[in-house]
Image (cartoon, rainbow, N blue to C red):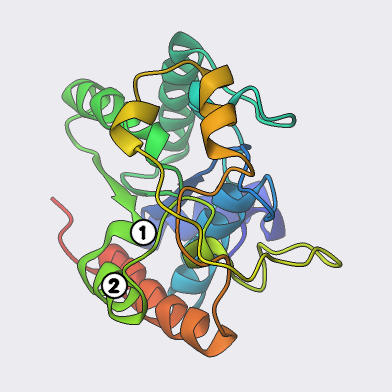
Amino acid sequence: MYINAMNWSQVEEHIKKDDRCIFPLGCIEQHAHLSLGTDMILSEKIAMDAAEPLGIPVFPAMPYGLTAGFVDFPGTISLRIRTYIAFIEDILDGLYHSGFRRILIVNGHGGNAPAGVVISEWMNRNRDASVKMYDWWRAPKTMAKVLEIDSRASHASWMENFPWTRLEGVVQPQHVKDCVDLNGLARVDAGRKRERLGDGCCHGLYERPDTDMLAIWEIAVEETRAQLENDWH
């Protein structure tokens, strides 16, 4: 249930019987030939698909994240860490003040990992709340399906090329991109990252059949829904 489809009194009544909600995290960053909003699109859609049959409110995805390494690709926006920490804390405070006590943060961007520390500190101050940060693509069954289909999966490769992240009229390259030195990539500035990455994809195919992508998506939605239904503390 998208929060934009509710008014305040409906939220108030809903919380009386169910204090769960979802807050997706995304990022606006280069994804080679895919949308700059790929991480935001995926986290919000998987949250919506997982929550829909349960009637759990989904808040709009936070579009901006931590992606300093890609800022030399035009359109990429990276927050400063102190800005990001404050934003996460303010959103959690707002959700808590509204009455939500079980909050699933569906993360769509690996660079947002520092949010996990912020969440731990926040829960120490709000001990009647339970917050789970969940990297949807790293879930065991989802990642197993990705590796079963093609282990050559990376940032901006086929594994992020879903019908809702590709751009109309943009033709995807058909070759297999060789793997860049990922360890070396982590030790250089944004300018040299762009030089080494070229189009922005790390390695592998750029696309696979939609039958493969939808099979991954189905599993990912099921695993995300299980996070909503189980293991709250």
Res 160 label: none
Residue flagged by tag 2: what amino acid is it?
Leu
Res 147 label: 2
Q: Which residue is drawn at 64% across and 44% down?
A: 199
**Badge 2: few (under 14), some or many (20 or more) residues near its Cα, within 10 Å?**
few
Percent x, y of residue 175: 58, 68
Q: Residue at x 57, y 65 (%)?
A: 206
Q: Earlier in the sequence, mark 1 or mark 2?
A: 1
Percent x, y of residue 210: 58, 84
Residue flagged by tag 1: what amino acid is it?
Trp
Using residue 138 as the reference point, say whether residue 110 is left or right of it. Answer: right
Marks 1/2: CA–CA distance: 15 Å
Front position in the image: 98 or 48: 48
Residue 55 seen: no
Q: Find the residue positioned furthest to the right.
A: 169
The residue wearing badge 1 is 136
Residue 202 seen: yes
Q: Disc 1 or disc 2, which is closer to the eye?
A: 2
The part of the image, by quadrant, that contains residue 100 is top left
Q: What element carries label 1?
A: helix
Classify the position of the N terminus by image quarter: bottom right
Q: What element carries label 2?
A: helix
Q: Find the residue positioned furthest to the bottom.
A: 211
